Image (cartoon, coloured by chain):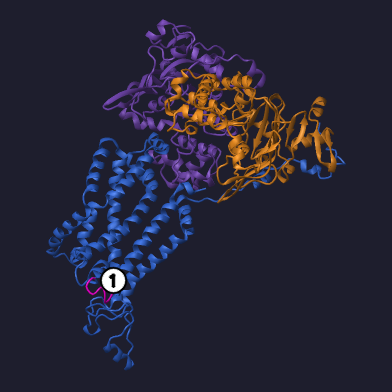
Amino acid sequence: MDKPLKKNPLSLQLDPNLFQPATEEEKAQQIVTRESVSFMRDAMRRLRRNKISMACVVILVLMTLAAFVLPSFYPYTYAQQDVTAQYLAPMQYSQKELAKISQGISVFPHLMGTDSLGRDYACRVIYGTRISLLAGIVSAFIVVVIGIIYGAISGYFGGKVDMIMMRIVDVIYSLPDVLIVILLSVALKDAISASKNLFIMQVGAGLISIFIVFGLLYWVGMARQVRGQILSIKEQEYVLASKSIGASPARIIRKHMIPNCVSVIIITAAMQIPSAIFTESFLSFLGLGVSVPMPSLGSLASDARSGLVSYPYLLIWPALSIFLIVLSFNLLGNGLRDAFDPKLRS
Amino acid sequence: MNLLEVKDLHTSFFTPSGVVKAVDGVSFNLSKGTVLGIVGESGSGKSVTAYSILQILTHPGRIVSGSIKLEGKELVGASEEEMRRIRGNKIGIIFQDPMTSLNPVFTVGNQLMEAILLHTNRNHSEAYARAIEMLNLVGINEPDKRMKQYAYELSGGMRQRVMIAMALACEPDILIADEPTTALDVTIQAQILELMMDLQKKMGMAIIMITHDLGVIANMCDEVIVMYAGKVAERGTARQIFYNPRHEYTKGLLNSIPNIDSDGKERLIPIAGTPIDMLNMPAGCAFAPRCGQAMKACLKQHPEEVWVAKDHLSACWVNVREGLKNDAIETGEGGKIVRIDTDKGEKHE
Amino acid sequence: MNDNAKRPLVDVRDLKQYFPISTGFFQKKPLKAVDGVSFEIQKGETLGLVGESGCGKTTVGRSLLHLYTPTSGEVYFDGVKVEEKTLPQFRRRAQLVFQDPYSSLNPRMTVGDIVAEPLDVHKLYSSKKERDEKINSLLHMVGLSSEQATRYAHEFSGGQRQRIGIARSLASNPEFIVCDEPVSALDVSIQAQIINMLEDLQKKLGLAYLFIAHDLAVVKHISNRIAVMYLGKMVELASSSELHRHPLHPYTISLLSAVPIPDPDRSRASRRIVLKGDIPSPLNVPSGCPFRTRCNRATAICAEKCPEFLEVEPGHFAACHNI
């Protein structure tokens, strides 16, 4: 028995129609679902909001483009010597060039001046940047691959395997790396120079020995990070769930563990690059890196030592370049770490 | 005069993703010696209400408006100095996880005596004696030995007893218990609840018991507030809430919990849908999307709190609908509903 | 044959699971998480397993599934002993549902991939289309929609995530599921939804459950029989109704009386047997009967000899010297 709702004359704001049941669609409209977003996209969005990181990305992209694309279009080459144009200050012209200009021939200015052999410095710095970036990225790649595999195996199997593997890492860590790097560079350089392999000759003994040294020594940081991450993931219940389904260890590592390490890997790799560039720079500075006439930022800095007081710009340009690359990668690494940090995810 | 009067309290959290209205207009009174239960699920705002009273909200939460009066004195807007005199002294609080509430680097005795020394003018040895007295009171054996122990050396139940001893050391008028037994085993929970009831009788303090466990509420509380999405859904005595619920959420909760005494395998009647997303609150009654009795009014406007019996308050349009049907609505000035006699219609059926 | 009809689906015999814990330099003490537990589960039946911290109920579930290698004892599944070579088959037919819906789903995988993992591991489909169809039907079975297959776990509420976990456990068409506290981490209003769903799935698919929980009311509701554990030992086993009407073991009696009833009058009227003292640590299990330190019936023999788990009444087992 459903009596019709009496309209109470005093409660004007109550419309009896309001007391009809609400339909399912009306109820569903009230619920707003937030848009779907994967972890990676969420992290990238956070990264994009970080202005400093975005600035670093821009700087690095520009520098990379300049380093790899510009030399093809540049009017000078890094080996082109001109004894009449020695030690020109930035934007200064030599006598010969001034004469040419007065004749109406356009001469591209030396944006960064010239060095002791009259080589255009801007070109050498740009080329040096290319070498440094290459060294950094290839070294980082080697480190990443070896580090991930080593860390994943150590972390996954745990127990004695982990203990032995980590003791090896500890030993490598405690070696005086600078000393070893220098010794290895010296030893390898002679061995590599003797090789007739075209690829090796092109890249240069110096760079190859740097890569080898990195492959032997510098992966330990990444291995530790990955191992640590794997250890914590191992305790997660979704790994146990996978085991209870019957998944093999290979599948668990591949599908569950590595994808969850991606943030750690990216961050560590981003921090690895500047360290590699720095190492290459100081090796070249010591004369153990690339060989003449190929410039690297370190070797340029080294050459600038003589005549430093009179021609300071010879040191400033390569130093500035190193500084920008290393700083940008470091800040970008920080930004990536913040972007991937799940605690910040609201 | 009521011991504690909360009027139209609004507490919000200002997060980067938006404003969360954790407490959205809550009012209630607490009289001396009463045990009040606040029941609700995650997101209901029950804990935030308690933290607002003591003003121990974590950033980015803060009280936006409303009044909290302790023995007539206004606490909202009080200085930090004044609040410190009240915390531990007039109002004590115990938390859910005793492991994280006790400082691991100090002994139990040290922490017990800290509160006593802070709020009373006993000297060191008097405070020590009082601490021993408290440990005895909460049923901890070998109190001398316990005073020298650290938190990790005690079991969960013991730690919670120590928390209770700390909270009651200065004989507060009100004890707030925020899910005190949720992390404990059932038999230990029984011990702790029995202890709390004993102490309440002995010391005569009022208790605000915050929990999601309706069994605990039925066992301990004189009055009950049911909260949903930051608002009071229903308020009344324990018998009223359990035997005569007047809000669809309360009814849903009572129907959905399995009763250990029931013999047959009657199917549980769950509440449909999922808990609300506090960042995307629907217009109208927050419970409407999940309510089997939802009406168009529910989606449009949040129902006001209305008295449905003596000391029994509810905020639900279903009461208004039934009241209109049975002509049991009493209105006041401006056409505002003052009372609905919900028993009226039942007699006729 | 009669044997076949009565042969239990799950037959656990004297299961022991000890974990070596280092208590000092070069010293190792065994943590006896499960200390000789035997029970059977019939096809389509729900056996509830209750107990408090340190009783070993979660370990029983995982040892049974051989997620830990049992220290000793045997598990027979459908008459076949579970060991290294029969493990792959076993893994397909016996599954586990976890307590924590937040950590049991891989945050980097889509819901569809999570649910389909058993299908991928055991290669239970022949084409991508078939895989997608199976994913959709699994999602529907647990009350979710097919569009949600491309979403990520963190976008769902606790109750929905638990549904995803349950869908995953159903993917390989198992006959037996160990439910390890499946509703403890959920809000009260959602618990009933999941419990009803588990019951419906059981009826529909003929599943057997080992339902591990600490909430006695929930366990009583869903179980046919209930086993009570204390510090690694099973102390009582009986049908749900029998256990509540006529509990024999003193621990069961106090456990039942400790549960607060959501009914003010009955709650205050009922006499509660409050146990004294704390639950001992599983590293220091009392000699003889582990419950004797808190038992009001303890006598001299209780400290010397651990009581045997005997059938005191038909279908009703208990381990106590003083029943």
Q: Looking at the picture, does residue C217 appear above or below residue A138?
A: above
Q: Looking at the picture, does residue B47 appear above or below residue A190?
A: above
Q: Looking at the picture, does residue C320 appear above or below residue B290?
A: above
* A29 on left or right of A72: right
Residue A156: quarter of image: top left
* A183 on left or right of C163: left
Where does residue A184 sit, x and y in percent of width and height? 17, 56
Kindly report the secondary structure that dominates the magenta region of the rendered protein: loop
Magenta range: A305-311
Where does residue A318 sit, x and y in percent of width and height? 30, 69
Asked if residue C278 can be seen in this view, the reply is no
Q: Indicate the colour of chain B.
A: orange
> Residue drawn 70% across and 24% down?
B239
Q: Mark 1: give few (<14), some (14-19) or many (20+) Cα within 10 Å.
A: many
**Which residue is labeled 1 in the image?**
A315
Q: Indicate the colour of chain A.
A: blue
Where does residue A100 sit, x and y in percent of width and height? 29, 91
* C2 on left or right of A253: right
Asked if residue C247 can be seen in this view, the reply is yes
Where does residue A4 sit, x and y in percent of width and height? 83, 37
Residue at the far bottom: name it: A103
Task: Find numbered disc 1 in the image and state the secondary structure of the residue it sits on.
Answer: helix
